[in-house]
Amino acid sequence: MTSQATPEEPADRAPSAATEPQVARDVRGGDGARPASAGTPVAVPDTAAVDAAVARPLHIFDTTLRDGAQREGINLSVADKLTIARHLDDFGVGFIEGGWPGANPRDTEFFARAREEITFRNAQLVAFGATRRAGGSAADDLQVKALLDSGAPVVTLVAKAHDRHVELALRTTLDENLAMVRDTVAYLRDQGRRVFVDCEHFFDGYAANPAYAKSVVRAASEAGADVVVLCDTNGGMLPAQIQAVTATVLADTGARLGVHAQDDTGCAVANTLAAVDAGATHVQCTANGYGERVGNANLFPVVAALELKYGRTVLPEGALAEMTRISHAIAEVVNLTPSTHQPYVGVSAFAHKAGLHASAIKVDPDLYQHIDPELVGNRIRMLVSDMAGRASIELKGKELGIDLGEDRALVGRVVERVKERELAGYSYEAADASFELLLRDELRRGAHGGAEGEAPSRFFRVESWRAITEDRPDGTHANEATVKLWAKGERILATAEGNGPVNALDRALRVALERIYPQLAKFELRDYKVRILEGRSGTESTTRVLISTGDGDGEWSTVGVAENVIAASWHALEDAYTYGLLRAGVAPVE
Ligand SMILES: CC(=O)SCCNC(=O)CCNC(=O)[C@H](O)C(C)(C)COP(=O)(O)OP(=O)(O)OC[C@H]1O[C@@H](n2cnc3c(N)ncnc32)[C@H](O)[C@@H]1OP(=O)(O)O
Ligand SMILES: CC(=O)C(=O)O
């Protein structure tokens, strides 16, 4: 590999052949993404604010934009990174690690644009990079220079802390690695940056050679690092190990310590809190736990634990109640479906299914919840299923705004009907709208003296429907459906074509009803899921269809069950249209 000076660099500062090799492509220039000020490092703004952030007793350090972006399936544009940075700043984290400037044009551009476009209210921007190359000097290292050029007031340096990694990955001596840490930290401090040092593979390194691992911590701290972060890079540690090692390192070195935990044992959040228990005062996390391999310590449960269980104030006032919204907003930007079962922020985090739980919750929600969901911006939800009891139905009724009063017989009938239907394959927990229709039907029956077979409160009465799929010799298909129904005393017959039999049925139903109920024009099928139940009988199995429908103002879900997929879809569609009209405030007539 040859070395050459970029036009902005004096020849005497050009890297030598011995020191140059790691330089990233955009730092070398020529791709247009390089910062305009590559010759003169960008000045650090507002050092008082940076000093105050570093002085805080407990740092919340977010690395979604750096380690989070290392997750398989995440590919962030600069605009995505800027949006996420704004969300994290709104949430109130103290530090946002924006990426590795110089490693790729996107990260370089992110720092340039973040400087120009974002006025951070809470967070300090952090640039991530490595210590200088072996055998070189920090001042001549183009990778280190890119960190300064980023203009970030804080730099995180990744350093080797495991002797085997120094010898095998860096291919240098243990002493030279210590010199690389010392020189790079001291140089960046001289240039006015605050410095955190990520000791990669610290815990594995400590197990192999504790004296050397600690000497890396001392080298970083003595050279001026503000925090030395103990990293469980391979994510193989358990909380007791993290706690014991962190406590010993703190006692032996006196350095300010942080923790960075990967989640390979599923213990990253616990490991992070164990380090805090042992005296670490800086936690590195990512939104929703995104990160390399299985991910990193999840920012949201870590912060919630610190605020709500440890009683530490780590966020600005009111920010915790924004947590659910921010978690979901970031999931949207990275284009991943939010995990429904994520602690604190998942939609299922406070969803109650068991009848016994519901009966206690009716008395006091705290009996089955570890916190009030509103503290983190989430909400309690009651799920209706064959595990429901009377209390579940009463609470669900309240949630839907339907007062069931003290009518024990009515509630009992609803419980029975739900159980029967769930046995037949229905599932109401993901189909609130179908459950509400069932509840309203039972209420109406109650009002008519509970007579079995009383007509439900609906907007149309179906006489019959049929769907035909025609297979043509040229390999194409035609789908046609006919619907015959009664609405407002009128018999209507409508036929429509579609790109499948269900689509044809949906269109025929729409054609039949749209003149009488123009509100239908806004309804839109959003999601359609089919589940084959009791797979043992193959094509004769029972089929469950779940449909989500929207009207621009909200979305509702309905369920249909039958022995064939088209009939199941029809039932779910019927409920979807009925519920949509009810939502639109139309009075039922049939
Ligand atoms: C644990 C972590 O997650 S740390 C974060 C890791 N993140 C990333 O790697 C994402 C961004 N990385 C990249 O874009 C590229 O790897 C770059 C630009 C950093 C380097 O690319 P290249 O110059 O092509 O090198 P390559 O990736 O093959 O190898 C990394 C080099 O850095 C060296 N290195 C590794 N850790 C350190 C360190 N702490 N200090 C100094 N050098 C280091 C390695 O020894 C290797 O050197 P070599 O090129 O002499 O073999
Ligand atoms: C620094 C880092 O990402 C790690 O050690 O896992």
Image (cartoon, helix red, strand yellow):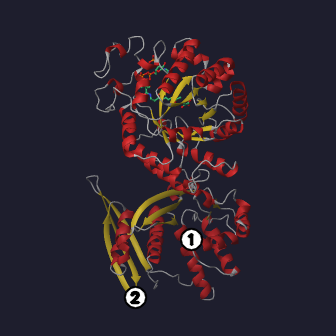
- Numbered mark located on residue 489 in the image: 2
Instruction: Give me the disc on residue 278.
Output: none
Horizontal side of residue 37 vs 354, given as left or right: left
Q: Is residue 246 above or below residue 541?
A: above
Dots 1, 2 in contact, CB < 8 A:
no
Residue tagged by mark 1?
435
Q: Quadrant of ligand 2?
A: top right
Give the camera-side residue of 436 and 274: 274
Is residue 9 visible to us here? Answer: yes
Q: Identify which residue is drawn at 66% across, 60% down.
A: 372
- Using residue 519 as the reference point, say whether residue 263 is left or right of it: right
Residue 77 visible, this orientation: no
Q: CA distance from mark 1 to mark 2?
A: 27 Å
Circle 1 packing at 10 Å, graded few (<14), some (14-19), many (20+), is many
Give above or below for 139 relative to 317. above
Residue lying farthest front? 48
Quadrant of the snapshot with the N terminus: top left
Q: Give the residue at the far left of this rendering.
A: 474
Q: Image point 40% across, 37% down: which residue?
A: 111
Please name whichever residue, 112 or 480, is drawn nearer the observer in this view of the structure.
112
Q: Give how far across and how far down residue 482 sits, in percent.
A: 35, 72
Q: Which of pointers 1 and 2 indicates the residue nearer the eye?
A: 1
Tell me the element at label 1. helix
Position in image of residue 472 (x %, y %): 28, 57
- Callout 2: SS: loop
Q: Amino acid at mark 1?
A: Phe
Q: Is residue 184 left or right of residue 390?
A: left
Q: Around disc 2, counting alpha carbons within 10 Å, would you say few (fewer than 14), some (14 to 19), or many (20 or more)?
A: few
- Residue 64: give x, y in percent of width and height: 50, 41
Up/down of 423 relative to 47, above or below: below
Indicate which disc, 1 or 2, sits on the residue closer to the N terminus: 1
The spot of residue 156 in percent (x, y) is 51, 31
